[in-house]
Image: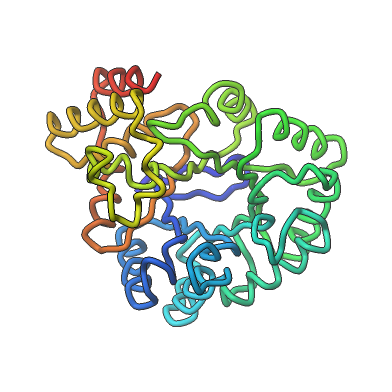
Amino acid sequence: MNKHPLGRSGIEIAPLAFGGNVFGWTADEKRSFELLDRFVERGFNAVDTADVYSSWAPGHEGGESETVLGKWLKQTGKRDDIVLMSKVGLWEARKGLGAANIEAAVNDSLTRLNTDYLDVYFAHTDDQDTPLEETLTAFSKLIEAGKVRTIGASNYSAGRLRQALDVSKAQGLPRYELIQPLYNLVERDKYEGELATLVREQEIGVVSYFSLASGFLTGKYKTLEDTKGSDREQFLGHYFDARGKRVLSELLSVADELGVKPAQVALAWLLARNGVTAPIASATKLEQLDDTLDAVELVLPVEAIERLTKAGE
């Protein structure tokens, strides 16, 4: 399988990353192990998690995803087979990007993950109360200590990412080699435009999250009524506006014409976007995972890409 570079880091990943937010939440430990086994067996290698996963779930505190993933790594010995990504800064227990917090958080994450190092460590969200130099210096020390190979920024605006890059250059500090923006067929404003231009200019990798818009782009929910009583009801309502319905209609049409799943079309559209390294997608069933992974083989006709793109404008 062709691998894509993560910025200038020297790290390469397959063109789709597994979103580990489901581990220990909607996928129990046994199912999580099965999903991870299948993911690696099929030649994929990037797994994305965070210390905050899954603190939002009733009865959960955070750290559950890393803990399950760490058990799998210990049991299988497949640490060298994956590019392991985690994040710091969003979890209430380890909030912010101050130096002391970053040092404590990475040690906690490494313990839960049963590993000595992370391939990628993300600033999970921008912390404007902490100087960028402090944050980047803290990350630099982790790289020097061998605890982190490279760093990334999630949920940064173009302006703040540019500032961070300027600080890295001026201070001789490691730079953010990849970003993790919210980006999908129906939500495009946080990436397209200034941010997309900046990452292409600076050769920064892009791993997009919410790639299927919380399930809206799977085609499972064709009307707002379809979401009623489902575990996705609270997340999907705002998508069913005029533009969302237009995108969904075009997505379903293209999928039907090509004889593939709507989710595969949505992921293939992302993969065709200039600058996108690998969308992040989750799955809780093996058949769902297989369908998701098959998206990397789907090459959309130019005319279909244009129709989908126009629908979301």
- The residue located at (31%, 18%) in the rendering is 306
Q: Position of residue 191 (x, y in %)?
A: 54, 30
- The residue located at (64%, 30%) in the rendering is 202
Q: Quadrant of residue 211?
A: top left
Q: Quadrant of residue 119?
A: bottom right
- Quadrant where the C terminus sits is top left
143 left or right of 242 in image: right
From what the image shows, is residue 229 above or below residue 213? below
129 left or right of 178 in image: right
From what the image shows, is residue 130 above or below residue 188? below
Comparing 94 with 19, the one in front is: 94
- The residue located at (39%, 31%) in the rendering is 186
Q: Position of residue 10 (x, y in %)?
A: 59, 47
Q: Quadrant of residue 243?
A: top left
Comparing 269 with 55, the one in front is: 55
- The residue located at (80%, 40%) in the rendering is 168
Q: Position of residue 174 (x, y in %)?
A: 75, 46
Comparing 210 with 198, the one in front is: 210
Comparing 104 with 110, the one in front is: 104
Residue found farthest to the bottom: 75
- Tally the marks: 0
Specify the color scheme. rainbow
176 left or right of 263 in image: right
